[in-house]
Structure formats: structure tokens, C-alpha cells
Amino acid sequence: MSSAPSNLVIAPILIPLLAGALMLFFNERERRLKTVLSVLSILTQMVISLSLLRTVHLDGQTPALVYLVGNWPAPIAINLVVDRLAAVMLMLTGALALPAILYAMERWDKVGPHFHSLFQFLLVGLNGAFLTGDLFNLFVFFEVMLAASYGLVLHGGGLQRVRSGMHYIAVNLVTSLIFLIGIAMVFGATGSLNLAEIALRAEWLEGFSRVALHVGLAMLGLAFLIKAGMWPLCFWLVPAYAAAAGPVAAVFAMLSKVGIYALLRLALLLPGTGAAFGSRVIFIGGAVTLAFASIGLLASQSMKRASAYFILISSGTLLAAFGISTPGGTAGALFYLLSSTLAVSAFFMLVELLEREQDAASGVLAVTQEAFGDSDEVDEEELEVGRVMPSALAVLGIGFTLLAMVLIGLPPLSGFLAKLSILTAVLGPGAGDLATLEGRRAILVVLLLVSGLVALIAMARMGIRTFWAPVEPFTPRVTVMEATPILMLLAMLIALSVLAGPVINLLQFTAADLHDPGRYLNAVLGAERVPPYAGREH
């Protein structure tokens, strides 16, 4: 393994960290410069993430790239690890971040201070959570991510946004406390914070140490499931996401996936293929979440709340599929994760454009004197800095239709292919009888079909009310720059459908790695230190 690729592992953390810190030195009037820095930062991260993905996927001898911070030997070192799963999540983060920051250029980066810095620090936390190989730094990156999200969820002000944002902050502060106590319990039981070392030692623990480990893992699982939005731990999510600004909600679609990633990563490393976190409990929680979100979607009168319920539908589907814990089901669920996250992110932005004229919080778009000073005062009309796009309603209608097809799961787009992959793993050759695994397979099949029907009813109702028979006619003022990010995400979804074969192949290898933790353990514990430079005295 060459040293150059492994040195790149830390780049997705350093680049947004340096970019966010650098932008703090510039005045809020330098928005164009900040935007350029943000876009360059995200593009660089995407290029590096693609390079890392190519290395770990195409090089059969490199199951994971490991960077030993400080060049200490494993498992003492703080290690950063890129395997297929981490690389896929890094790519998905960049794929969401770029359209979100472009969308924010038109309006939202002007309604509050330090938007671009907060956005970059959020990426630091997200990328670090996917890369870290030890529990404590997973907590650290969680906190970096959450600290930035606190500022972003309140960005723009307004009574509803502040009220929901404060609930969001309170819940996540409690979650962080649970997370930290769980880490302490696991460290006390195993004497290590390294994920690979914990997995090795867990099998041999006895007596009180084993009990302490299980209690610690239960607390970690609780923290991860709160972040993932599992019922009944999800009541904070819908109000906060529905009230957030469009580009913020779009990138927040990734935050719930961090909890699912952490749960999947640690559960499949430990002995028992998910038994340590209770695969049955995870399945039941996911199934109930899917049912709850489907009911909430039907009851939603606001498209923004419906968008947030689609986040819960995604989380419920993923948790239920991972609760069955088979390689085929995991691969299908990962494909669903890609498809649903991209679709919900685009839907958040599209819905904001459709509801903007009726949105009570739109007054925050008039920039306040306190934030920007007398000489930089702008009003609502001045915020329309881009060229207004002709036939905007038709473009939004086409986008709504395509996103509806993905979220419902209609062919031939990626939502259908994702659900088909999960159903094939459950019903296909080698899946076993539907009665196996205590009926979980049959329950998952029914819930996938019913949730698709519910999404069809809800999206048809929203489409009729918005485009076919609106209460009062409206012509949305949409600029080219606002429509472009949505079209970018739609293009990604179409590409995901066209390239479904190679993507499924990648995710099948990813699932195989997850269900064979020996490859990860060998890569981490066998990581070699960088040799001393030539000429150094020994």
C-alpha cells in the first residue's frame, strides 16, 4: 500500500475545516468569495472521495486505507479508516452538499451570519464520523456536526424555526450525554476505544465486564437510534426539519444516516452479526417507524412536513432491512439509502420553491440591519439576484413528478430498483421461507408495499392541490440558480438508475465486507506505521 493514498484519508476532514476557519476572517459582505471557497472545498472533497473509492473498490489487495494519526501503532493510534462503506458515504455527502450550497447562494446565505463556515464545519463532522475508527472520535465528530447543525437549524430566525430548533438542540444535548456515558461503559469493559480492538475483546469478556459492555452498547444504540429517528425517539425530527431553510433541510437529510451508519458499522463488527445491538429490536423499531411515518405522511397538510416524514420512511425502511441482517438485504438497503437520500434532499428544495409565497417564515429573507449594517441593506426584491426562469411551474411540475416516482418506488427510476433489490433479497433464491426469522421477511415485504401505496396517495394529493387544482393560481418566481441544484440531484437519480448494475455490484461488495468483519479488523490492526525518512539516525 502506497503512502500517498493513505495520506489522502485525512483530507476530507482537513479541507472543510480549513475552508470554514478561513472564511471566518472575511466580512459578511464578501459572500461571493465565501461561495467560491465553499464550492471549491466541496468539489475537492468529492474528487478525493472518488479517488479513495476507486482505490478501495478496484484494488482487491486494499480492503481499507488506514491513516494512523501521529504515526502511533494500532490500536493505540487514533486511526482514520476508509473502506467501501465509508467511501460511499463520503461521496453521498459531497453529492448533497454541492447542490445545497449552490441553492443557498441565491437567498439563504444572506439571511444570517457565517452560513458558509457553519456549512463547512458540518461537513467536517459528517466526514469525520464516516472516517473515524475509534469510539471517542466518533463522539467528537458527532459533536462537531451537531454544533454546526445548531447554528444552521436556527439560520434565518423566525418563531417556528427557533421553537423547533430549540427542541432539536435539547434532544441532541441529551443524546450526546447518553453517547458519552455509553463510551465510558464500553471503555471500562474492554479497555479500548478502537472499534477493531473492541470487536476482538468483546468475544472473550466474562462476568461483570460482559454486562458492562452490553449496557454500554445499549446506550450507544439508543444514541444512534435517536439520531436515526426511530420511533418513539423521532418526535423532534419532523418539526425541526420542516422548519429549517431549504438548503439546510436538504443536507440534513444526511444527518439521520450518520446514526444508521454508526449502528451498522459497530453492530456488524461485533460478534453475532448484529446480535449485540439486538437485530430483532432494530427490526421492530424500523417496522414501527415505517408504519408511523406512513400515517404521518397521509395526515400531513404541509409539503414541508411531508418531506420530513419521507426522512422517517427512509430511516424505518433501512432499520427494518438491516434488522434482517443478510448480505443481500444490506446491499439493497444501501442502494435504497443512496436513492432516498438524494430524492428527499431534492424534494426539500423543490417544496420550498412551491410553498415560498405561502411560507410565513419568508419574511426572514429581508436581511436585517443588525446582521449586515445600513450600507448593505437589501429587501425581498433585491434578493432575486438571479435571472427568473421562464416556465418555472412546468419545470417544477416535471421535477415533482420524477421525485414522486422515486419516493413512491415506481419504475424505471432508482426508487423502484432499490425496493426491488430489497424484495429480491427477501423473496429471491436462497432467501428462505417467508416464515423464517420470526416472520420478519413477510412483515418487511408488506410494509414496503404499503408504504409505497401511502406515498402514492400522498404525492398524488399534493400534486393535485399544487399543480392541477390549486386553491388560488400562482406563478412561482424561481431563478435559474435555484432550479439548477434540483436538476443536478434529478440527474444524479437518473444516473443512479442507468448505472444501477455497477452501483449494485459495488454495494454487494460493500455488504460482503460488512458481514465479513475480518477484512476490516486485519486492515486496521495490521496497519503499518510510516517508516522514518532516509538519513534519520536511529
Image (spheres, helix red, strand yellow):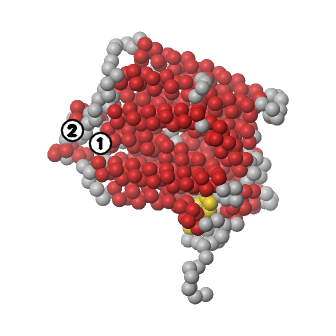
> How many angstroms separate mark 1 from mark 2 (CA)?
9 Å
Q: Is residue 135 above or below residue 98?
A: below
Residue 304 percent across, percent down from the top left: 45, 28
Name the image quarter holding the C terminus. Answer: bottom right
Counting from the top left corner in percent of width and height, residue 487 is at: 44, 33
455 horizontally vs 323: left or right: left
Q: Is residue 436 visible?
A: no
Tag 1: amino acid: Lys
User: Is 361 drawn above or below residue 108 in the view shown?
Assistant: above
Is 206 placed left or right of 19 in the picture?
right
Q: Nearer the viewer, residue 407 or 282?
A: 407
Q: Position of residue 141 (x, y in %)?
A: 52, 55
- In front: 446, or 520? 520
Is 127 situated left or right of 195 in this image? left
Name the one closer to the observer, 2 or 90: 2
Q: Amino acid at mark 2?
A: Val
Marks 2 and 1: in contact by CB < 8 Å? yes
Question: Residue 321: horizontal and vertical position, in percent?
Answer: 69, 36
Which label belongs to residue 378? Answer: 2
Q: Would residue 416 be visible to someone looking at this image?
A: yes
Quarter assignment of residue 162: top left
| Rendered residue at 32%/24% (across/down) | 390
In the rendered structure, find residue 110 and report the number of the disc placed on it: 1
At label 2, counting other C-alpha atoms closer than 10 Å, the crowd grade (few under 14, some 14-19, many 20 or more) is some
Q: Who's the residue at 66% across and 50% down the image? A: 265
Name the residue located 59 percent from the left edge and 52 percent from the top edge. Answer: 53
